[in-house]
Image: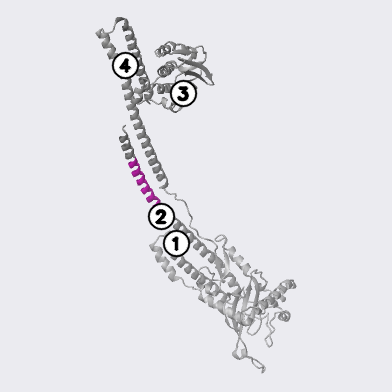
């Protein structure tokens, strides 16, 4: 093919490849952009699902902790306002509550005292250790309040804290109808999963759940207002010793009685215990107002007696660490890394704050959107499409290259064959005309006839090579494999080989005494050897010495037949090219020895067809070809 046409073909192929690759790139970018958007949406959806799940687990955890907290609050609020009215053997004092450090009370202008001391003292002597422990805690409480940097005495601090606890409780919402109605309306508009992934929905749900927890705790606390159960009298002789250790010996105050019925009818106002933080410690505090009876026997009334009222603050000192552990055990399966932090009265609107106790839930759990690679149904088709496009471009390039090479080989073959046919045909025409016209003397006719015979052999050999190569290319070649000795194989071709070399003035030196056995197609081997001898006759006609050697020796599983001459040899750069079919152009065929460049290509294919190989080996002088055949 002419160079301009070659460039046109390659340019057309390049333009098509660019268009196809450009379209694929545009399509891929669009698909990947869509997948990135889908991946981002998927990550956002996953994160929203995780946030919704975390919020739901948080709400359930708060419900569990507030349920336990409400039970503790209910138990403590069931204590009568006058603890001295409780029999010494009552479960109120003998039960073991690890979260309770001390139950105490303080009247206005006084210091903290503990009715538990009198009750424990009045029981069996086995509680001496518990009594000593309570006394030590009472002293620690007095020291704690005395060293508290807040202004005011112990009474003022605890009274203010009790009021703050009540205010904080009243600030807790206990009506969630608005949020529930709004969420119900939204649920009717959207699907459940879509709605629960919205942050606004979760916020309203948290607010609603907190209000419902507040309402539930308030209803639980109302149970504490039920009348106390009937108390059991205790012997009067134990009361005096109990009073001595109670710490409640204010001057002029009536001695508390342990064995009477409840004095609750004398209580003017009793609030409920509320959790507050004082000096870094957790307390349950409430205010109690007593009715003071008028003085008798002409005694001078005090200010409280004149008003008819006496104010107390009753409380429970709690071990916050034990209480935290109890509450967190309820939610280990929901929030394994959670902890509880102290919360003040400003946490009334905090959805993570408990209602029963002033704790705030710290979840210690992060919601992170998972970064997953793009694995979508389009990923595999994209790779397949790109692979198919790349394979198509590569295949098209190879196909165009093969077609162009085939076109070049066809042109070279036509040119070479035309040149090879022109010379003998010209000789045939010229000599036949001369013989027909009688222009050739009788004694010279033999020389003319030998020339014609030689040219006929030349044409016959050319046609035989072309036909054999055509059969191999089409796959129609048939092999007749049999076992033969190399000596016999060479000997039967000696006459033909010597005759061809004689035309070039060369002789044959062949070792035909070898007895090595091979499995070959004898006709194919004879064809290969004749092509090698024919090349030697063409290119080594003027060699010195004018001899072509054929030697045989074993090489493992193969038998090697070596054909060498003493001609100019073959350059290393040409040793691969000479085995290509039709490697001669018309110019090379005209300027070199006769031939179309088909003999060596045909010989190598014939050798491979029977399991052998033909190679061109380097030698110090002349050309050397090695034909390897499988040994029998």
Element type where label 2 sits in the image: helix
Q: Position of residue 329 (x, y in %)?
A: 59, 63
Task: Residue under label 2, please give it.
Answer: 37
Query: Who comes first in sequence, dot 4 or dot 2?
Result: 2
On residue 196, which mark appears? 1
Q: Position of residue 189 (x, y in %)?
A: 38, 63
Residue farthest top in this picture? 442
On residue 424, which mark appears? 4
Q: Are circles 4 and 2 on residues that touch, CB within 8 Å?
A: no
Q: Nearer the viewer, mark 4 or mark 1?
A: 4
Question: Which region of the structure is painted magenta?
Answer: 14-35
On residue 90, which mark appears? none
Residue farthest left in this picture? 437
Query: Which corner quadrant of the image does residue 416 belong to?
Result: top left
For the residues labelled 3 and 1, the Cα–Cα distance comes to 81 Å
Query: Which corner quadrant of the image does residue 539 belong to?
Result: top left
Q: Nearer the viewer, mark 3 or mark 2?
A: 3
Mark 3, Cα crowd under 10 Å, few <14 / some 14-19 / many 20+, is: many
Residue 568: in magenta span: no
Q: Nearer the viewer, residue 609 or 246?
A: 609
Can you say which quadrant of the picture contains the N terminus?
A: top left
Main SS class of the magenta portion in the image: helix
Residue 34: in magenta span: yes
Residue 416 visible in the displayed image? yes
């Amino acid at each position: 093919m002419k160079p301009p046409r070659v460039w046109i073909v390659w340019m057309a192929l390049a333009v098509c490849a660019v268009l196809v690759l450009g379209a694929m790139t545009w399509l891929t970018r669009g698909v990947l952009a869509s997948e990135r958007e889908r991946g981002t949406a998927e990550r956002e959806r996953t994160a929203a699902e995780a946030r919704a799940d975390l919020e739901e687990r948080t709400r359930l955890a708060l419900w569990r902790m507030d349920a336990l907290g409400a039970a503790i609050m209910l138990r403590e609020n069931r204590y009568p306002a006058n603890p001295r009215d409780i029999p010494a053997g009552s479960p109120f004092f003998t039960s073991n509550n690890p979260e309770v450090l001390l139950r105490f009370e303080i009247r206005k202008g006084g210091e903290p005292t503990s009715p538990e001391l009198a009750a424990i003292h009045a029981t069996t002597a086995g509680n001496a250790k518990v009594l000593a422990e309570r006394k030590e805690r009472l002293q620690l409480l007095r020291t704690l309040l005395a060293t508290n940097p807040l202004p005011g005495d112990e009474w003022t601090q605890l009274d203010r804290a009790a009021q703050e606890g009540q205010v904080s409780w009243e600030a807790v919402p206990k009506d969630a109808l608005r949020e529930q109605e709004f969420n119900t309306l939204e649920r009717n508009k959207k699907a459940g999963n879509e709605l629960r992934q919205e942050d606004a929905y979760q916020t309203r749900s948290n607010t609603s759940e907190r209000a419902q927890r507040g309402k539930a705790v308030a209803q639980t606390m109302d149970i504490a207002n039920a009348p106390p159960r009937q108390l059991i009298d205790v012997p009067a002789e134990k009361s005096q010793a109990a009073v001595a250790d109670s710490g409640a010996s204010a001057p002029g105050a009536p001695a508390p009685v342990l064995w009477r019925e409840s004095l609750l009818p004398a209580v003017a106002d009793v609030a409920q215990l509320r959790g507050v933080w004082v000096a870094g410690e957790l307390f349950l505090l409430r205010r109690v107002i007593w009715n003071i009876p008028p003085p008798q026997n002409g005694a001078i009334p005090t200010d409280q007696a004149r008003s008819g009222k006496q104010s107390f603050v009753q409380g429970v000192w709690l071990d916050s660490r034990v209480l935290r552990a109890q509450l967190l055990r309820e939610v280990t399966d929901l929030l394994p890394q959670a902890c509880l932090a102290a919360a003040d009265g400003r946490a009334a609107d905090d959805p993570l704050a408990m209602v029963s106790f002033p704790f705030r839930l710290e979840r210690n759990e992060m919601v992170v959107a998972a970064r997953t690679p793009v694995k979508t149904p389009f990923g595999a088709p994209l790779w397949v499409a790109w692979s198919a496009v790349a394979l198509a471009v590569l295949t098209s390039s190879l196909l165009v290259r093969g077609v162009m090479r085939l076109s070049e080989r066809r042109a070279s073959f036509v040119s070479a064959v035309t040149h090879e046919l022109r010379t003998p045909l010209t000789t045939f025409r010229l000599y036949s005309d001369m013989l027909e016209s009688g222009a050739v003397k009788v004694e010279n006719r033999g020389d003319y006839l030998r020339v014609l015979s030689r040219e006929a052999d030349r044409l016959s050999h050319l046609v035989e090579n072309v036909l054999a190569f055509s059969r191999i290319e089409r796959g129609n070649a048939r092999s007749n494999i049999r076992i033969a000795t190399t000596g016999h194989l060479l000997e039967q071709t000696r006459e033909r080989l010597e005759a061809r070399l004689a035309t070039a003035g060369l002789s044959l030196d062949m070792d035909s005494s070898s007895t090595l056995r091979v499995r070959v197609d004898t006709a194919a081997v004879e064809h290969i050897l004749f092509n090698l001898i024919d090349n030697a006759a063409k290119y080594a006609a003027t060699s010195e010495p004018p001899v072509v050697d054929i030697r045989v020796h074993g090489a493992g599983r193969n038998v090697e037949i070596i054909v060498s001459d003493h001609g100019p040899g073959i350059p290393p750069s040409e040793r691969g090219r000479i085995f290509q079919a039709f490697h001669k152009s018309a110019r090379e065929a005209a300027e070199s020895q006769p031939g179309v460049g088909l003999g060596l290509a045909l010989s190598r294919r014939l050798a491979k067809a029977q399991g052998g190989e033909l190679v061109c080996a380097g030698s110090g002088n002349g050309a050397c070809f090695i034909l390897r055949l499988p040994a029998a």
